[in-house]
Each structure stands twice: as structure tokens, then as C-alpha cells.
Image (cartoon, helix red, strand yellow):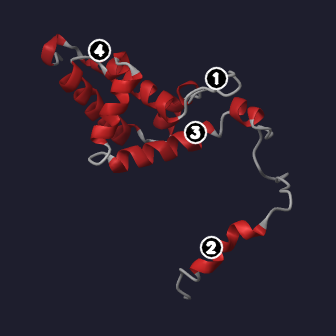
Amino acid sequence: MAMSGGQGEGDKREQERETLLSLLDIIIPPSEDGRLPGADAVGFIEYMYKENLDAWIMAGVQSIHEEALGRYGAAFHNLEETRQRRIIEALRTRLFRFFSQLTMEVIKCYYQDDRVLLAIGAEPRAPFPLGFSLPDGDLTLLDEVYERGKIYRDV
């Protein structure tokens, strides 16, 4: 199936994949010291398909790709970071839900990666049945929650 501009379906999918990888790198870039990988290196694409998130993610990615082509005549992933951020800012209102949900899914996937867990000092294992011990903390951090009061209804 030919796309406009002579771009085939396979080319389009590759462009969208590269756009997604660029977005992931903006959401969580690798640490400068190399200890923490960027979000583009933790298997998010596989996670996206496993969790059946691909339809809405790729729809948002397609909008970003089209905006890049319309504004700059180049694929999003080929643009310098400043231009990529301009595109995101321009689409932030229209794609607010997409960016919010994508960021949450990226965070969920990122903190399941063994390299990330090891780098932050956590054991790369399931929390149960061993659980995790939490140090006694400063409970004043919960003051806002207590001051908010009851936000649920007794049933």
C-alpha cells in the first residue's frame, strides 16, 4: 500500500517507531554517567504490545510525526531536540491525554527494568513473597493527605 509522498506502509511504521523512540528519550533520557538507561532502552515497544497499548500510542505518535513533517519537512526523530520540544509544546494541549498516559506507561515500564532497579539500589525481584522493608520515615510528609480530609464515601 503506497502512502503519500511515495512512502510505503513499512517505511511509515519505521518512521513512527523512530518517533516513539525519540519521545521515550525525551521522557526519560539516559543519565550522563551511564548508570541509568534511557526509556528508549528498556523494552518499551515490547511492553506496549504486551499490554495492548499500541493502538492509542501509535495514533498519538502518528500525530507527532505528521506535525514534524508539516512544520519542518522532516521526520520527528531526525530533528534536533529543540525542534522536537517545540512540536511537543505545540501539541501539548491537543494531545494532553496522550502525553499524560504515555508518560505514566513509560514510568511503569522503566521501573520494571532490572538495570534501573539495580542502579537505584533496589533488588530486581518481585515484591512478594519476601516484601520490602521500608525505613521509618518522616510522617509529616503525609500532612497534606491528612489535611485534605476524607475523600471517599462510606458504603
- The quarter holding residue 110 reads top right
- The quarter holding residue 73 reads top left
Q: Nearer the viewer, mark 4 or mark 1?
A: 1
Using the numbered discs, state the Cα–Cα distance from disc 3 to disc 2 in whole angstroms. 27 Å
Mark before the other along the chain sequence, 4 or 2? 4
Q: Amino acid at mark 4?
A: Asp
Q: Residues within 10 Å of mark 4 (few under 14, many from 20)?
A: few
The residue that mark 3 highlights is 109
Image coordinates for residue 81, horizontal then vertical, percent = 41, 23
Q: Residues within 10 Å of mark 1 (few under 14, many from 20)?
A: few
Q: Nearer the viewer, mark 4 or mark 2?
A: 2
Using the numbered discs, state the Cα–Cα distance from disc 4 to disc 1 in whole angstroms. 32 Å
Check if mark 3's residue and mark 2's residue have beta carbons within 8 Å: no
Image coordinates for residue 145, horizontal then vertical, percent = 62, 73
Q: Amino acid at mark 2?
A: Val
Image coordinates for residue 26, horizontal then vertical, percent = 47, 31
Mark before the other along the chain sequence, 1 or 3? 1
Question: Hey, which residue is sitting farthest bottom in the picture?
Answer: 154
Residue closer to the observer: 17 or 8: 17
Check if mark 4's residue and mark 3's residue have beta carbons within 8 Å: no
The residue that mark 1 highlights is 32
Regarding mark 4 in the picture, which secondary structure is present there? helix
Query: Vertically, is 131 above or below 13?
Result: below
Regarding mark 1 in the picture, which secondary structure is present there? loop
Image coordinates for residue 154, horizontal then vertical, percent = 56, 88
Using the numbered discs, state the Cα–Cα distance from disc 1 to disc 3 in whole angstroms. 21 Å
The residue that mark 2 highlights is 145
- In the picture, the quarter occupied by the N terminus is top left
Q: Report the side of 29 relative to 114 (left or right).
A: left
Query: Vertically, is 136 above or below 34?
Result: below
